Amino acid sequence: MGAWTHPVYEVEVAGQRLDPAVVSFWVQAQGSAADSGRLVLADPEETLAPTLARGQKAVIRWGYQDDPALTTIFEGLVRAVQPDGLQVALELIDYQAVLQAPSRRITRTWEHVAPAELAQDLIAGTGLSLQATVPGTQIGRFPVHHLTPKEALQQLTTWLSRETGTEHRFHVRAGQLVLGPPDPGQAPALNLETGVTLIDRRPGKLGMTLVETLVAPIQHGQVMTVDGVRFFVEEVVYRWHAGGRTLLQVVPC
């Protein structure tokens, strides 16, 4: 347990480190849905709230004091600023926000295009780069009628899943659109043991298992083990309030 005894976090908004002001935060991250969260800051003199605004970049990292690098559990934008007496709360959303903007609606038809090339076209101008693990087979015709980039990407993943017989997904992480099938064969990013680092294991939602542990360096789309048994992480909720908890929705792999 030695490595699990000194949890730390870093919270940055608009390039300003706000660690001392943090009261609590939570982040929910899952599959193709945008990561979202809420950050509560102490603001007793009401000097912090005026410096915060919708659209500012927000980053939350956490881990342990001896870690060579902390794990980024959120990177995105401030969606709303809510002053509340001696505190101020920030609603957060990840960079999928730029894929959902109504101003980016697309009406266009692609012909004889590779899936990766199509995905690159769909995110053009968003500031995101592409990390795609998709077949090079060309799509004969791909019409998009007044859809946001996110809606068009959902259409693309449906096509890929149908054509390959393997589920394809996308999410945004570290400024990249990650597109491809889940990888249950990867090396585990986290290993939990009953009575040591596992707090609880119980039925989760939609047939999944809910695993609870302390501050953990793991993200959805990764693999973990519980007492040596492998699980694929479908969803993660990170919580901090006078201590950290990680709640994972997992399936066997």
Image (cartoon, helix red, strand yellow):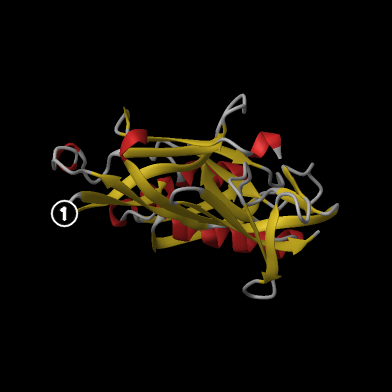
- Determine whether, in the image, residue 5 is placed left or right of residue 21: right
Residue 218 x, y percent position in the rendering = 63, 45
Q: In which quarter of the image is residue 205?
A: bottom right
Q: Work out whether 54 lies above or below 72.
A: below
Q: Work out whether 91 lies above or below 159.
A: above
- Determine whether, in the image, residue 93 is placed left or right of residue 31: left
Looking at the image, which residue is at 76% across and 55% down? 195
Residue 220 x, y percent position in the rendering = 62, 52
> Which quadrant would the N terminus be assigned to in this image?
top right
Residue 42 x, y percent position in the rendering = 26, 44
Amino acid type at image mark 1: Gly
| Mark 1, secondary structure of its residue | loop
| Crowd around label 1: few <14 · some 14–19 · many ≥20 (10 Å) | few
Residue lying at the far top of the rendered structure: 68
Q: In this figure, which residue is indicated by the disc labeled 1?
A: 85
Q: Is residue 15 visible?
A: yes
Q: Is residue 129 visible?
A: no
Looking at the image, which residue is at 46% across and 53% down? 27
Looking at the image, which residue is at 67% across and 34% down? 3
> Which quadrant would the C terminus be assigned to in this image?
bottom right
Residue 209 x, y percent position in the rendering = 70, 68
Q: Closest to the observer: 44 or 101?
A: 44
